[in-house]
């Protein structure tokens, strides 16, 4: 029996045989990989079994795949019918317009209510969702009525299919009957392409109560006494908000900085709120509201304090001097509860509002990115000390001095307590009887040596300035305080700040 006939024998007990010439029973590797591609092994000696398999394939007219492997198909040449359904029907949705009737109990104005809905059928997974367009001041919970899901068709476990939806049909979903009256153009074309007749569109019936209400409003002209009336503001100014972009400039105070805010003024009731604009890595908690919506008085200090009071905010019984729309303008600084806010820009609606009501045409924004002029004096030769800022505190009770370094973000310096509270001896004084710094040694431009460094005083806070003015004769050193008014103008913009050399 030849080898070819032996391979054609069935592999059954009694028909198996052992090849006497075969000595290697392993399956040799005929392909190797080079640069990610499979290539045949050179000088490969085929076993007798491989020869018989190759002869069998050639004798039957088959093409062997020993060298090149099976040919792959180009996915771009695939027909649409071969693509899976989740690719063919992705983002394909049928939209139908429908309505349902809702009975009203215990009402003399209406017996039923007609509500319009949209029915969406998702072809990718045969799910359905129903939503109702939101109507202002309807008093009815609207929006999503039925979430996206497979809806049961009957008690036999069947679900609604896209063939069950068409114009003129009624479907019952969870005990509520929906009447389909229209569909969009794409849904109509899809149903027609599937061989389904689509009837002409119908009109959605109007709600009888809304129709009656519109007829009453048409024949009656409701007016108010004046434009300052609350009802007039509600009807004409509801949801109209003036938006200003502002900054709170408090860098002249200790630990102060420039902070950005958005001021929103509601025209319907003359209330305002202030929202803080947070920046990346600003180190502040992400609270959205800096001042919650309320009526803000123009001068909080002139409001008489009544006791007892029910709330912390002032009411109309304490004052009638509130902020209104005429108090805001681009480039103007307003004071809100002791804080000065500079309005540097506004949005388009605010510009159009002020242009129509007040005739204002100039809305040029103010550049707030310029750095303020500082009063520091740098005498250090080290570049790292050029930006360091310190605060000297002089304690009048025991003539002690403490120094605090202001932390600067991303500077690599920790900041905090630089020198604990102690008496500091003047340089070149006798160690046995040292001469310590006194309050007379502190003034603008004075130099203080401490901890091996020399500090130059550049600013003073309001409390220090007030103390120096009250004891002006005591601190006239080298003519520094010869003109008290000039001194106040020069140092009022800064804090008690010093710089190390």
Image (cartoon, helix red, strand yellow):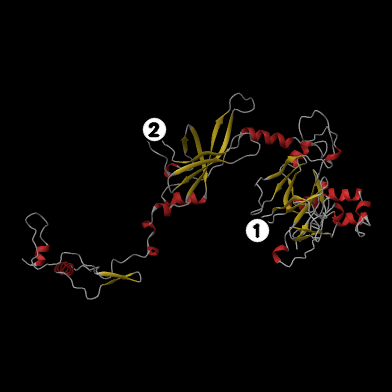
Q: Which residue is drawn at 18% across and 64% down?
A: 26
Residue 347 shows up from this direction: no
Residue at 46%, 37% in the rendered image: 171
- Examine the rendered structure and indicate whether residue 310 appears above or below residue 266: above
Q: Which of 174 and 72 is in front in this view?
A: 72
Tell me how far mark 1 sits from mark 2, CA to CA: 68 Å
Say which mark, if any, is on residue 94: none
**Residue toward you, 11 or 228:** 11
Q: Residue furthest top?
A: 106
Q: Is residue 88 left or right of residue 465?
A: left
Say the numbered circle drawn on residue 155.
2
Query: What count of labels does the image hold?
Result: 2
Residue located 37% across and 36% down the image: 157
Q: Residue 5, how many percent across, how many down?
A: 9, 64
Residue designated by label 1: 410
Q: What secondary structure is marked by label 2?
A: loop
Residue 217 visible from this viewpoint? yes
Mark closest to the chain's N terminus, 1 or 2: 2
- What is the quadrant of the N terminus in the image? bottom left
Position of residue 80 relative to residue 212, above or below, is below
Q: Residues within 10 Å of mark 2 (few under 14, many from 20)?
A: few
Residue 275 spot, x, y in % from top left: 70, 47
Q: In this view, does 469 lie to the left or right of 266?
A: right
Q: Which of 202 and 126 is in front in this view?
A: 126
- In the picture provided, is 475 more to the left or to the right than 267? right
Instruction: Say few, some or many: other residues with alpha carbon within 10 Å of mark 1 (under 14 / 14 to 19 / 20 or more).
Output: few
């Amino acid at each position: 029996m030849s080898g070819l006939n032996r391979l054609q024998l069935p592999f059954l007990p009694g028909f198996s045989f052992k090849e006497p010439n075969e000595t290697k029973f392993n399956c040799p590797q005929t392909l190797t990989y080079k640069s990610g591609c499979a290539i045949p092994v050179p000088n490969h000696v085929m076993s007798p079994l491989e020869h018989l398999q190759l002869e069998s394939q050639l004798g039957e007219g088959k093409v062997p795949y020993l060298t090149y492997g099976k040919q792959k198909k180009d996915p771009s040449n695939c027909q649409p019918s071969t693509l899976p359904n989740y690719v063919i029907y992705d983002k394909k949705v049928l939209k139908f317009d429908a309505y349902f009737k809702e009975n009203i109990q215990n009402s003399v104005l209406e017996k039923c209510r007609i509500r319009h809905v949209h029915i969406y059928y998702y072809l990718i997974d045969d799910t359905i969702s129903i939503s109702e367009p939101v109507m202002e001041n309807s008093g009815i919970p609207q929006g999503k009525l039925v979430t996206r899901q497979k809806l049961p068709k009957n008690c036999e476990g069947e679900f609604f299919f896209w063939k069950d939806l068409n114009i003129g049909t009624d479907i019952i979903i969870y005990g509520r009957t929906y009447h389909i009256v229209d569909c969009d153009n794409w849904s109509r074309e899809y149903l027609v392409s599937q061989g389904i007749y689509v009837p002409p569109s119908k009109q959605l019936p109007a709600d009888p109560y809304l129709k009656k209400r519109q007829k009453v409003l048409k024949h009656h002209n409701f007016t108010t006494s004046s434009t300052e009336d609350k009802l007039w503001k509600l009807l004409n100014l509801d949801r109209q908000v003036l938006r200003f972009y502002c900054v709170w400039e408090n860098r002249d105070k200790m630990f102060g900085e420039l902070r950005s805010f958005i001021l929103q003024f509601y025209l319907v009731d003359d209330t305002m709120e202030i929202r803080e604009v947070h920046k990346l890595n600003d180190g502040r908690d992400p609270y959205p509201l800096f001042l919650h919506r309320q009526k803000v008085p123009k001068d909080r200090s002139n409001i008489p304090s009544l006791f007892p009071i029910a709330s912390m905010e002032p009411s109309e019984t304490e004052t009638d001097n509130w902020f209104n729309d005429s108090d805001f303008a681009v480039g103007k600084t307003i004071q809100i509860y002791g804080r000065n806010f500079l309005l540097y820009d506004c949005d388009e609606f605010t510009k159009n509002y002020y242009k129509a009501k007040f005739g204002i045409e100039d809305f040029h924004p103010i550049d707030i990115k310029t750095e303020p002029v500082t009063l520091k004096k740098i005498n250090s030769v080290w570049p790292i000390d050029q930006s360091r800022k310190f605060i000297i505190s002089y304690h009048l009770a025991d003539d002690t001095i403490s120094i605090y370094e202001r932390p600067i973000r991303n500077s690599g310096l920790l900041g905090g307590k630089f020198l604990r509270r102690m008496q500091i001896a003047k340089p070149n004084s006798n160690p046995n009887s040292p001469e310590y710094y006194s309050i007379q040694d502190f003034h603008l431009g004075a130099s203080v040596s401490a901890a091996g460094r020399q500090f130059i005083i550049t600013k003073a806070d309001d409390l220090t300035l007030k103390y120096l003015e009250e004891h002006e004769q005591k601190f006239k050193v080298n003519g520094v305080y010869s003109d008290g008014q000039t001194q106040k103008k020069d140092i009022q913009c800064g804090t008690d700040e010093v710089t190390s050399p």
